[in-house]
Image (cartoon, rainbow, N blue to C red):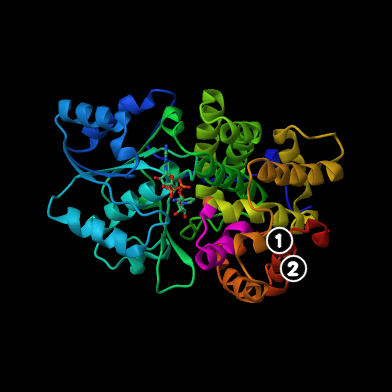
């Protein structure tokens, strides 16, 4: 056993927006929330959503509330760093006092990083890593349209930097949006592949924060952003899995299933809150190089890797996996069988939503695997949260199994 069950964890850390507005129609609370924070709003919006009726309504409501608005709608998926710098440069002379980010994870992360660059001296690379932001950041109001990265509630923003072989993150409590407005109706138009990739990432956030190591924090020192599984992250992650386990296949198959969309929006919010303190581990560490090498979406890589990673951690995380089996509705009462049932159910969900079943199908070559292992092993802030020692050797075994789509090799 790797540690106490979630009921007996003895410590907790929470990072969260000052306010969360969740529910169908919650988007209508935007204007009042923004007007509380400022009178000149920079709206960073996904180009697809910029043409939507909901966004036009939001602009009208902001105007009626006396908030002047400038719209930036050039958002490139997976967020190249040059786009972030260009967006901040374009907005600087306008002197916004609040940033509204509206869209998928790429738009939300762009909004968060523009808020950072407008408040603190650059370059952005100064802030790569954890706890590196030295002063206040413009207040951010986040409105997600995918379910999702959970970015509306996290201290994280992720960019692609051509100077680095991996995607890089800025993780700092000052990046947590002040207000998260989560309206499931805004996700209804997301196409099936976006629903699948962003939805499985939300499940990975819950599964990885729930299987991350639990260790007592060094309270006398500045806390790392990711402290590992804790009493609050565990509670949220398990509830997120409960909501999303059945909802994700439904949301992918039938995009206008409003109940499925609502469960997904709820689960991804909980996933963001859970991993915002608990952290993620090996699926994320491995996705960083895989995504950079194959130019595939974040959630496609984290989702594909999850069953393999959990299989490799099974012995060390059996109690957690057994609890996950209950949340996923596949428990039988035997902890050993239930641990495997949870992993099998997650693999089944990946198949049901049409994820590529192997790294070979994702476009990697076998000769690239050692480099993936080496780069992932270097993402120590995440690998340190795994319940197993993430040696290049173990990472190679996981990659090798995932390359051929054969989980049984990790038993
Ligand atoms: N900050 C965090 O905590 C965090 C966590 C996980 C992932 N991420 C990052 O988030 C990004 C991925 O975000 P994502 O999965 O939300 O995708 P995305 O924001 O890249 O969007 C993918 C596509 O979906 C479209 N889209 C979004 N919402 C839509 C809607 N409602 N209707 C129709 N089309 C819609 C966009 O126009 C885009 O073409 C990656 O860069 C990833 O690294 C951040
Ligand atoms: Fe993720």
The answer to if 291 sits in the magenta stretch is: yes
Q: Residue at image x 59%, y 68%?
A: 376
Q: Dot 2 surroundings within 10 Å: few (below 14), some, or many (20 or more)? A: some
Does the beta carbon of the residue at mark 2 sit less than 8 Å from ligand 2? no
N-term mark: 1 or 2:
2
Q: Residue at image x 78%, y 48%?
A: 318
* Image-based side of 355 in relation to 133, left or right: right
Q: Secondary structure at mark 2?
A: helix
Q: Residue at image x 30%, y 29%?
A: 53
* Residue 236 at x, y percent in the picture: 58, 37
Tell me if residue 272 comes above or below residue 90 in the rendering: above
| Magenta segment main secondary structure | helix
Q: Nearer the viewer, residue 106 or 333?
A: 106
Instruction: Check disc 1 and report the residue beneath it.
Output: 402
Does the beta carbon of the residue at mark 1 sit less than 8 Å from ligand 2? no
- The answer to whether one can see residue 353 in this image is yes
Label 1 close to label 2 by CB (< 8 Å): no
Q: Dot 1 surroundings within 10 Å: few (below 14), some, or many (20 or more)? A: many
Could you say which quadrant of the image residue 335 lies in? top right
Give the extent of the magenta segment: 281-298
Q: Secondary structure at mark 1?
A: helix
Which quadrant, please, contains the C terminus? bottom right
The answer to if 288 sits in the magenta stretch is: yes
* Image-based side of 16 in relation to 251, left or right: left
Could you tell me how far apart the alpha carbons at marks 1 and 2 are, in whole angstroms?
Answer: 9 Å
* Residue 14 at x, y percent in the picture: 49, 43
* Eye-nearest disc, 1 or 2: 1
Instruction: Check disc 2 and report the residue beneath it.
Output: 397
Q: Nearer the viewer, residue 10 or 394?
A: 394
* Image-based side of 251 in relation to 16, left or right: right
* Residue 146 at x, y percent in the picture: 46, 40
- The answer to whether one can see residue 214 in this image is no
């Amino acid at each position: 056993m790797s540690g106490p069950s979630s009921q007996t964890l003895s410590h907790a850390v929470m990072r969260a927006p000052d306010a969360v507005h969740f529910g169908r129609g919650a988007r209508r609370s935007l204007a009042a929330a923004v007007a509380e924070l400022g009178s000149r709003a920079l709206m960073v919006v996904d180009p697809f959503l910029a043409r939507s009726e909901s966004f036009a309504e939001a602009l009208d409501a902001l105007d009626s509330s006396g908030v002047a608005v400038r719209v930036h709608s050039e958002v490139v998926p997976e967020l190249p760093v040059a786009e972030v710098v260009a967006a901040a440069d374009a907005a600087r002379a306008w002197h916004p006092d609040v940033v509204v980010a509206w869209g998928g994870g790429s738009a939300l992360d762009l909004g968060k990083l523009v808020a950072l660059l407008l408040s603190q001296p650059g370059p952005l690379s100064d802030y790569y890593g954890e706890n590196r932001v030295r002063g206040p950041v413009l207040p951010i109001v986040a409105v997600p349209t995918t379910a999702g990265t959970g970015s509306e509630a996290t201290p994280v923003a992720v960019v692609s930097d051509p100077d680095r072989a991996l995607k890089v993150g800025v993780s700092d409590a000052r990046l947590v949006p002040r207000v998260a407005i989560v309206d499931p109706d805004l996700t209804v138009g997301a196409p099936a592949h976006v629903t699948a990739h962003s939805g499985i990432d939300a499940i990975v956030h819950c599964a990885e924060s729930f299987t991350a190591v639990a260790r007592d924090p060094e309270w006398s020192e500045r806390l790392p952003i990711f402290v590992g599984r804790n009493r609050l992250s565990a509670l949220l992650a398990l509830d997120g899995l409960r909501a999303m386990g059945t909802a994700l296949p439904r949301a992918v198959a039938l995009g206008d299933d409003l109940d499925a969309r609502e469960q997904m929006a709820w689960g991804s919010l909980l996933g963001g809150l859970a991993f915002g303190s608990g952290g993620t581990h090996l699926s994320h560490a491995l996705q960083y190089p895989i995504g950079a090498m194959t130019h595939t979406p974040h959630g496609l890589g984290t989702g594909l890797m999850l069953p393999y990673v959990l299989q490799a951690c099974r012995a060390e995380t059996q109690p957690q996996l057994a609890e996950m089996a209950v949340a996923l509705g596949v428990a039988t009462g035997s902890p050993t069988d239930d641990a495997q049932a949870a992993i099998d159910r997650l693999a089944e969900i990946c198949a049901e939503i049409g994820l590529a079943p192997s790294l070979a199908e994702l476009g990697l070559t076998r000769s690239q695997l050692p480099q993936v292992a080496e780069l992932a092993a270097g993402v120590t802030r995440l690998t340190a949260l795994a319940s197993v020692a993430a040696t290049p050797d173990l990472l190679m075994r996981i990659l090798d199994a995932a390359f051929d789509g054969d989980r049984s090799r990790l038993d």
